[in-house]
Image: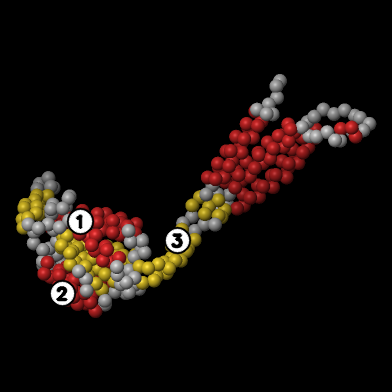
Amino acid sequence: MMQMLHPNWLWLFLLYIPLIAWYVYKHRTMHPTMRMSTTEAFDRLPTSWRGWLNHLVFALRLAALGCLIVILCRPQTRDSWSTSDVEGTDIIVAMDVSTSMLAKDFNPNRMESAKKVATQFVAGREHDNIGLVLFAGESFTQVPMTMDNATLVNAIGQIKMGLLEDGTAIGDGIATSINRIKDGKAKSKSIILLTDGSNNTGVVAPLTAAQIAHKYGIKIYTIGVGSNGNAPYPVAIDFAGNIQYQTMPVVIDEATLQKIAAATGGKYFRATSAKVLEQIFKEIDSLEKTHLDVQRFSHTEDNYMPWAIALLILLLLAALIDYTLLRHIP
């Protein structure tokens, strides 16, 4: 719906009154006259086409003035809220940001590959309530549960190594995720846990956290990120600030990750490449979804461009008629 930011400018339409009066007066007095006893012989003569064109040019200029007045009023499309019934699910993406995620068995490394796939996933989940939890030696909530995909995408893009104390606290990452998702309205709640190692620190044991998740009806999909065999791992930083790598065996505690998934009714995936995450997305799509009332907000935008275009067209048309069909030869 259109609204005017400065509706008081509409009073300028009162200018039409003196302009029309001036035009009528000028039209009657601009031609030479002579006195005659009667004009009965001329009463049936039609008005010439030039006379009608003069009226048309005046009308076009009045319309152009009207467009200018509307532009001064600054027309806008008004902010509005709309509510729609959609099906959605609650999801927490819990991502390992420990130093080992910089291993280069993925291109360019595990962390960047995980961020890319997570970004694509979030961008495609229009009606889901999604949160982002990061963990290493400790855990914290990067983004609470939200349907604002843009905020999530920006947050994922800003993930980098060094945000948290180094280590792999899988249990703490799950516990933080549970705290964020347990009160969600959707019947289906799930945690996608991405890690490339084994639990070596933290307060909560991974299997204890899994039992708590099961109590709240939360499924955990665990992903072991890392290729089979050996991989270049970061081991030091040289004097120039460059990360030094050393080829080492890939060690992932798959047994624990499988137990976590099994205890909650989820699944374990070994991500030797980013493509394996597509299986998780298909699994989440098949989950039971809950009907949710989603409110969407549309912001205000200026909508003067149609009036500006109309103003330009009217002035050009009036000028074209004035300098061609109504042109006077001296």
Task: Kindly give the residue lying farthest to the bottom in the view shown.
Answer: 215
Residue 290 left/right relative to 297: left
Residue 297: image tag: 3
Residue behind mark 1: 274
Secondary structure at numbered mark 3: strand
Residue behind mark 2: 207
The mark closer to the camera, 3 or 1, is: 1
**Foreground pick, 273 / 27:** 273
Identity of the amino acid at label 1? Ala
Q: Earlier in the sequence, mark 1 or mark 2?
A: 2
Identity of the amino acid at label 3? Phe
Secondary structure at numbered mark 2: helix
Residue 285 left/right relative to 273: right
Q: Earlier in the sequence, mark 3 or mark 1?
A: 1
How far across and how far down the image is residue 241, in percent? 13, 47
Q: Quadrant of residue 265?
A: bottom left
Tell me the residue at 29%/74% (across/down). 182
Mark 1, Cα crowd under 10 Å, few <14 / some 14-19 / many 20+, is: some
Image position of 27 with respect to 145: above or below: above
Q: CA distance from mark 2 to mark 3?
A: 42 Å
